[in-house]
Image (tube, helix red, strand yellow):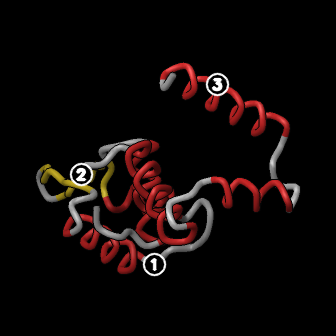
Amino acid sequence: MADISNAELEVLGVLWQQSPLSANEIIERLNEQREWHEKTVKTLLNRLVKKEAIGFEKEQRRYQYYPLIAQENYQQQASQSLVQRLFSGKVSPLVAGFAKNNQLQKDDIESLKALIDEWEQEND
């Protein structure tokens, strides 16, 4: 999967919430958070099409954009890439960093314990 910039990810996030959408509809949704220029968004859409992250269909004189990659798949690949690049493929230093900085909530810890329990049952 091609690298997706933070700005491209915001555009893709809009399409994960609802699709297909026209460029103008995407701009409207993005502008709910902060102001985006039409030309910038259209450039980002073109980049995402070239990266095969989104596709489009032409309806009369408008393009309707939709994601080609699922949000969950992207998150999984991006998180694996992050762990590989920053932590040599080891997850524990990442989690330990969050724990040391008190950024783990009780529900995070419970979720992690449940994942570990599930993994141990499947891999025994």
Front label number (1 vs 3) = 3
Determine the CA span between mark 3 and mark 2. 43 Å
Front label number (3 vs 2) = 3
Please name whichever residue, 92 or 1, is drawn nearer the observer in this view of the structure: 92
Direction from residue 33 to residue 9 in the image, left or right: left
- Above or below, 62 against 106 in this view is below
Q: Are marks 3 and 2 in contact (CB under 8 Å)?
A: no
Determine the CA span between mark 1 and mark 2. 19 Å
Residue on which the image places disc 2? 64
Q: Are marks 1 and 3 in contact (CB under 8 Å)?
A: no
Determine the CA span between mark 1 and mark 3. 48 Å
Location of residue 19 (image quadrant):
top left
What amino acid type should be assigned to the residue bearing mark 2?
Gln
- Above or below, 41 against 66 in this view is below
Residue on which the image places disc 1? 37
Residue on which the image places disc 3? 117
Residue 70, position as x, y percentages in the image: 35, 43
Count the numbered circles shown: 3
Direction from residue 14 to residue 50 in the image, left or right: left
Q: Earlier in the sequence, mark 1 or mark 3?
A: 1
Q: Residue at x 31, y 77 (%)?
A: 43
Label 2: state its secondary structure. Answer: strand
Please name whichever residue, 40 or 124, is drawn nearer the observer in this view of the structure: 124
